[in-house]
Image (spheres, grey):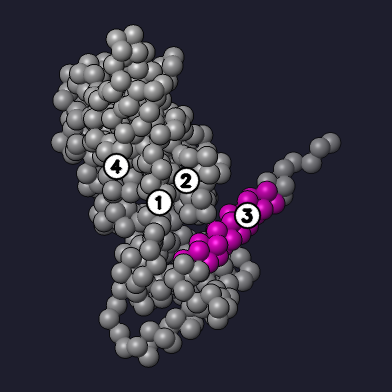
């Protein structure tokens, strides 16, 4: 069993924390070792196993003691003072967490900072419902597994969503929240998942946000555009309707590309990019900025098209809107019962609009193409707004005399 200092192997593949007895005995300095409850990391694809920094230090210590006593075999279990350790943060509330997990997942406990600030606390994903439905709070998604919560100008906290669809926050961050908020979080606290892999972990621990995934960049552009519209017109472009837990629970990129795995993801994406359009705000902006424009009977994407074309005066607005209409149509194909003829007709249209060749007509290509096109469209709108703002400033600037 090799030692490792990271939460990824040397090829950048994710490793996952495992508890329980390691059935395979391994050798350290001629002493046979079995781990009984000592966490270790595993590559789930190759089945290769690795010792965490915590496991390595503990084994080195016990092997040294065993050698002096002439012991040839060891079964190593977690020391009790690690398994039940509590930290100073939120020490008056019974949050469920594992000190052993904290010491075992690379990047959390550090040589000069192992006070428990980065202890992962896990929650039911429904914990986010409160923050999406109460107007006093704001929930910003920077990616499918990373976001921020805000309460007015008083506090904010970051969170992640792991592959088990549990929400993760750091114990030290929770400690900074008002007591009322801590009690609410406690009511949704669940037993540790021992799984913090997410863009939340990568951004906060690995400092990899700048190299985020395509999906992350699109989510960030969505937030940026909504903020620009708010600054320009006093109204946000997007909202998060419905229960946020139902959206996020199906938002992670599919691992398998059969219909049953893809459909929930597309349904969630449609909610985020299509159903979340704030029609009331868009109508008000159009009425104020272009009162002669007829919008009776228009909804959602068609309203947004009018906003781009008649208010923002963006050329090729239909082309810019294309990936969002494709996403909507893709959702209809994946989530609605219809004839095979109708499905084939809609999919042919989707392939055509995304410029997908005959050799690439499968779900993964459609998924990635939608994100590529949305990234381009959102970037073009943001760039256009920026250019118009700059021109407006130049026109109003007083000449230098």
Asked if the residues shown at circle 4 and circle 3 are in contact, with their CB atoms under 8 angstroms apart, the answer is: no
Residue at the spot of label 4: 167
* Residue behind mark 2: 13
Q: Nearer the viewer, mark 1 or mark 3?
A: 1
Residue 97 versus residue 295 in the image, above or below: above
Separation of marks 3 and 2 at Cα, in angstroms: 35 Å
Nearer to me, 111 or 381: 111
Closest to the observer, 267 or 256: 256
> What secondary structure predominates along the stretch shown in magenta?
helix
Question: Which disc is residue 45 wearing?
Answer: 1
Label 1 Cα neighbours within 10 Å, binned few <14 / some 14-19 / many ≥20? few
Q: CA distance from mark 1 to mark 4?
A: 25 Å
Label 2–label 4 contact, CB within 8 A: no
The residue to which callout 3 is attached is 383
Which residue is located at x 31 percent, y 58 percent?
Answer: 250
The spot of residue 384 in percent (x, y) is 63, 57
User: Which residue is at 17% across, 23% downward?
Assistant: 93
**Is residue 233 visible in this depiction of the protein?**
no
Q: Secondary structure at mark 1?
A: loop
> Magenta segment, which residues?
367-391
């Amino acid at each position: 069993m090799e030692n490792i200092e990271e939460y990824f192997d040397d090829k950048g593949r994710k490793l996952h924390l495992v508890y329980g007895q390691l059935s395979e005995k391994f050798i350290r300095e001629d002493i046979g070792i079995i781990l009984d409850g000592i966490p270790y990391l595993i590559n789930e694809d190759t089945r290769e196993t690795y010792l965490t920094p915590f496991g390595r230090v503990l084994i080195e210590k016990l092997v040294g003691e065993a050698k002096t006593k002439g012991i040839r075999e060891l079964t190593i279990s977690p020391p009790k003072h690690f398994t039940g350790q509590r930290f100073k943060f939120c020490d008056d509330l019974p949050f469920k967490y594992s000190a052993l997990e904290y010491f075992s997942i690379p990047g959390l406990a550090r040589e000069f900072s192992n006070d428990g600030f980065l202890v992962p606390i896990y929650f039911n994903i429904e914990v986010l419902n409160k923050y999406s439905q109460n107007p006093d709070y704001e929930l910003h998604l920077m990616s499918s597994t990373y976001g921020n919560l805000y309460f007015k100008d008083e506090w904010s906290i970051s969170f992640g969503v792991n592959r088990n669809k549990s929400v993760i926050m750091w114990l030290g961050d929770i400690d900074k929240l008002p007591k009322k908020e801590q009690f609410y979080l406690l009511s949704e606290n669940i037993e540790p998942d021992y799984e913090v892999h997410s863009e939340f972990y990568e951004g906060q621990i690995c400092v990899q946000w700048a190299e985020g995934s395509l999906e992350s960049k699109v989510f960030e552009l969505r937030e940026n555009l909504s903020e620009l519209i708010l600054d320009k017109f006093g109204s946000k472009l997007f909202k998060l309707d419905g229960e946020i837990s139902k959206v996020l629970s199906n938002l992670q990129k599919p691992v398998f590309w059969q219909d049953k795995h893809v459909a929930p993801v597309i349904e969630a994406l449609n909610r985020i990019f299509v159903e979340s359009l704030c029609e009331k705000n868009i109508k008000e902006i159009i009425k104020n900025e272009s009162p002669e424009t007829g919008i009776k009977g228009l909804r959602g994407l068609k309203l947004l098209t009018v906003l781009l074309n008649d208010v923002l005066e963006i050329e090729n607005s239909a082309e810019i809107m294309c990936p969002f209409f494709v996403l909507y149509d893709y959702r209809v194909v994946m989530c609605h019962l219809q004839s095979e003829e109708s499905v084939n007709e809609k999919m042919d249209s989707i392939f055509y609009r995304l410029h997908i060749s005959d050799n690439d007509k499968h779900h993964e290509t459609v998924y990635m193409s939608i994100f590529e096109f949305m990234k381009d469209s959102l970037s073009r709108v943001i760039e256009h707004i920026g250019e118009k703002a700059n021109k407006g400033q130049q026109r109003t600037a007083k000449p230098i005399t």
